[in-house]
Every structure is written in structure tokens, then in C-alpha cells.
Image (cartoon, rainbow, N blue to C red):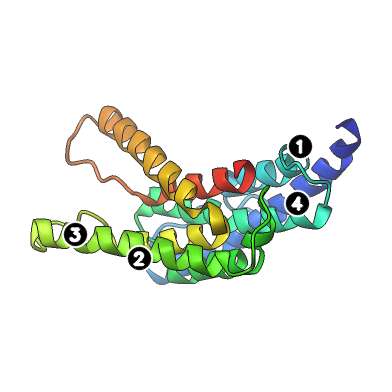
Amino acid sequence: MLDRVPIAIGFAVIGWCLGWASAWLSDWLMAKDDLPRAGQRPLLRDPLVQGASAAVWAATPFFLQNSDRLRWAETGLVAVPLIQVAVTDFRTRYVYTVMAALGAALGLAFGWQIHTVEMPWWTSPAGAVGGFLAFGFLWLLGRLIYRGRVEAMARGDITIAAMVGAGAAGCTPQALFLGVLFGGLIAIALLVGRRSRNATMPYGPGLCLGGLAALFWC
């Protein structure tokens, strides 16, 4: 495994740069909505996004069982939009369709190739459709239960579920299950931290974490 250390360092640099590009795009989108930007430093636009992206890219040589560097790079590419969407949604409760569409496109292109189990190409579009339909149903159910008075789930969460499904491919059920589990843990942490039952609870970060976990362990 020590022979992979130089590769991991190089991948960390790539992840850092891609995180910078992702944060730049997110800042540009937020500026159009008059939302505060993450930062303006030349090499440190968003430390959280860039650091997480660098960490995920550096981890791929060690946590993925295969020795195909192309597959490692594809895993990192699919992970970057998941990280960005999770961070943006947690901070602002905004889910940008452009970013989710980019993540879905990368998932459709590479998601079916990067898992530990061999999958046919159609599992990525099937995962995207499955995620969209599952959370679309939950969104509609929430609308019916609360009769439109309260939005139990934002429509942006449906696009996140589709993005996660595209990257998870045949592992979409596991990714969505983990996403719901992580979302519940985040919700509990917010309730305890803010000491209010009315604290807003974004589902996106949990779903994205589930998608990231599925990239490495499914």
C-alpha cells in the first residue's frame, strides 16, 4: 500500500483543484441569488469543499479494491458534486439544478463502472430514475399529508436523490437507505444543537453522504 502514497498525494492535489472549481461555480450561482459567497481567496475559495474533495480523492487508492487508476479518478469525479451539493444545502437550503445535473451526468457516465460489483451500463440511469421516483413519491405524500401548509421535503431533494442514484447505479437502494439514516442523525444533531423543534432540517447532506458511502463500500 505504501507504493500508492505518491498517487494519493497527486490525487489530493487534483481533488483540491476540482473542489476549487466546484466552489467557484457554486459562488457564481449564489451571487445571482444574492447569497453570501464561501470565500474569495485565490487558492482557498471554500476550505470545506476543497478539503473534503482532496480527502476523498486521496482516499480512493487505499479504499477501492481495484488497482485501476482510471476507476479511482472516476470515483473522485462523481464525488465532487456530491460534496458541493451537501455543503451548499446545509449552509443555505438551496439546491442548484445546475450542480445536481452535473453530478447526475457524471454519475450516468461513470457510476456503473466504479463499484466493487460489476454492473451493466443501464444501472446508472435506472438508479437515477429510481431515486427520482422514490423521493418524488415522498414529496407528494408530504404535500398530501400537510395539504400544502408545510413543505415536509423540498423539491430540490428529489433532484439530489436522482443524482445520488445515478452515481450509486445498482447500489441505489443502499445509498438511499444510508442517506435517510445519515439525514436522521443530522436532524437529531440540529435539534439538539439549536434546541428547537422548528429548526430546519436539510435532507440533502444526508443523501449525499449516503451516495459517497456507496461509492466506496458497495
21, 42: nearer the viewer? 21
Image quadrant containing the C terminus? top right
Q: CA distance from mark 1 to mark 3?
A: 42 Å
Q: CA distance from mark 1 to mark 2?
A: 34 Å
Q: Give SS at disc 2.
A: helix
Residue with the mark numbered 2: 133
Front position among marks 4 and 3: 3
Residue type at mark 2 is Leu
Tell me which numbered mark, 4 or 2, is placed earlier along the sequence. 4
Describe residue 1's horizontal placement relative to residue 88 as left or right: right
Q: CA distance from mark 4 to mark 3?
A: 39 Å
Tell me which numbered mark, 1 or 3, is placed earlier along the sequence. 1
Residue 136 at x, y percent in the picture = 30, 64
Q: Quadrant of residue 111?
A: bottom right
Tell me which numbered mark, 1 or 4, is placed earlier along the sequence. 1
* Residue 13 in view of the camera: yes
